[in-house]
Image: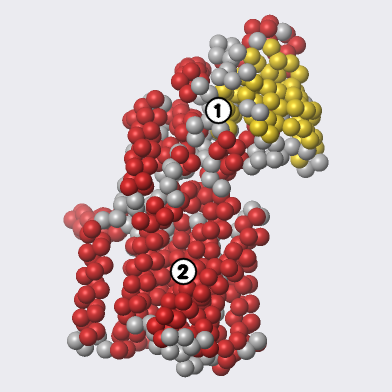
Amino acid sequence: MKKKFFSPKIFLLICLIYVISIAAINFGFINSYWEGILKIALINIILVVSLNLATGILGQLSLAHSAFMAMGAYTSVMITKFFTASGWLEFPFAVICGGLVAMFFAVFISYPAMKIPGNYLLIITLAVNEIVRNFIINFNIAGGSTGCRGIAHYSNFSAVYIITVLIVGFIYLLIHSKYGRATICISQNEMLTKSCGVDTFSYKIATFSLAAFFAGIAGGLFAHELLVIEPNMFDYTYSLELLAMVIIGGLGSISGSIISAVIFTILPYTIEFILDIKIIIYLLAMILVIFYMPTGLFSDYKAILAAIKQRFLKKFSRGEKS
Amino acid sequence: MILLKIDNVSLTLDGSRIIRNLNFSVPQNEIVGLIGATESGKSSLFDLISGVYIPDEGKITLAGIDITPLTIEKLTTLGVARTFQNANFFSNFSVTDNIRLGFHNSLKYNLFDVILRTQKFFNSEKEIDERTNELISIFNLSDYADMFPNDIPYDAQCRLDIARAVATSPKLLLLDRPTGGLSINQAEEFMNTIEMVNRRFKTAIVIIENDLNLLLNICSEISVMEYGTIIATDNPIEIKNNQVLTSICLGE
């Protein structure tokens, strides 16, 4: 890990993408259907990068990411729906409250799970995911199984884009500091990290709940974009889908997560028949990546280019021999 | 002056008493050897001092502060550093970054500085960069600075292990069989490195070692352990000349 501080090139790229997409939306190159898909892609970026924080950086597999998202979505919807304050001010407040609720539950879950050695967090998060979903259905939270309708449309493109950039930037800056370095070390050798003076227990809880906080925020944005939320949107297949995106993008790689989130969100809408069987394709791709490219498809594009080149060169040389 | 004092400490793990009524002390700026047959509780004693285990009874004090109930990360901040049996490192980080991790608590910036990338953040990182480079040259790791720990020779890995421990700026350094796996020549050279650390960083050092001869020149005193307690503490020559003690060290 060399000194990678905030570079003006990346900043310029972020601004450029924003200006181009805003222009395309306003001049009608992108219709409202595709605008919606782009927003979902941005929300998925938040989800995948934050899940990568918990899974790739900290090394704790979590399958409750869609549950944290549901907590954020339902909390923020209840705030914007039932406590009608003055228009725009309530949206940031509601979204942040959604994030905080998810974070609170993440602390609650991870505190006992991190105390014991072994990867019990995976089992606990899998359980929590279903508990949350069934809780919403059976206790009729905001409409229960029929879903919650009539949500105000607050998530416009600019808001979603800015929040995504802020969150991804925050995670990027965090990883390239002593906090990030220490967190990466925990997954490699916890005892040695402790003997470097790192309070690993607090780090684990803090990182996991931070990931949940961002998932909650993403849930808030998601609800105010789709305008209809149902508990079944947040089942564990969605968590698995996110996990597949993280692994395909590369564990611990932020740029990989961004690329895979964008590609795997947009792909099903461009190739029609994928939409129904997308979970099969994603999970199969995840398994193949685990076997053949454990570092991920998009994490180190230079290595992949080199590998492809080598393949082709081999073919050429074989051709020459025969 | 006494830096570390262990008073009548006992430890029971899984029903067996590993450490029994042990008394031990380490003077400031001295190198102390700890020898004994395998399974005599040497590493467990290190685990007690460094906070991996908390003793059932007894008291451990470091420079007058009671450190008995403290955990390993708190003890590191107070100035106890240790290495583990076999060289340990973070294999996904380069040699330089491995040493940098030892400086974790010397980086005096907070979350606010991280997000806004204040001057304090850059100054702090830069200062640690310099201190890391200094340690790299002291421990003769310049050739391997950008390589990964798995790719460097074993003796360099051992030096890396100590360099990372020294980076936490310890008052007391616990070395658990630092020469395990090295050849005789390498081990003797390694002892010179340890002596250099002692003189240069003013660190008290405790070394676990199986080979008494390696300790003769550098230790001010040597303690012999058997069945979880220290049975003798004397200067190295006396221990060497005592037939009973040397045979105990060899496990006979």
Front-most of residues A149 and B227: A149
Judge whether residue B213 can be spotted in this image. Answer: no
Judge whether residue B248 can be spotted in this image. Answer: yes
Query: Residue A66: image x %, image y %?
Result: 52, 75
Query: Residue B36: image x %, image y %?
Result: 69, 22
Query: Residue B161: image x %, image y %?
Result: 49, 33
Residue drawn at point x = 58 percent, y = 15 percent: B219
Q: In the image, which disc is placed on residue A214?
A: 2
The crowding category of the residue bearing disc 2, from other C-alpha atoms within 10 Å (few below 14, some 14 to 19, many at least 20), is many
* Tag 2: amino acid: Phe
Q: CA distance from mark 2 to mark 1?
A: 41 Å
* Tag 1: amino acid: Lys
Residue drawn at point x = 59 percent, y = 20 percent: B28
Q: Which residue is mark 1?
A: B171
Q: Chain of mark 2?
A: A
Residue drawn at point x = 59 percent, y = 69 percent: A105
B216 in relation to A33, above or below: above
Residue drawn at point x = 29 percent, y = 59 percent: A301
Quadrant of image for the N terminus of chain B: top right
Q: Are marks 2 and 1 on the same chain?
A: no
The crowding category of the residue bearing disc 1, from other C-alpha atoms within 10 Å (few below 14, some 14 to 19, many at least 20), is many
Q: In the image, which disc is placed on residue B123?
A: none
A101 in relation to A293, above or below: below
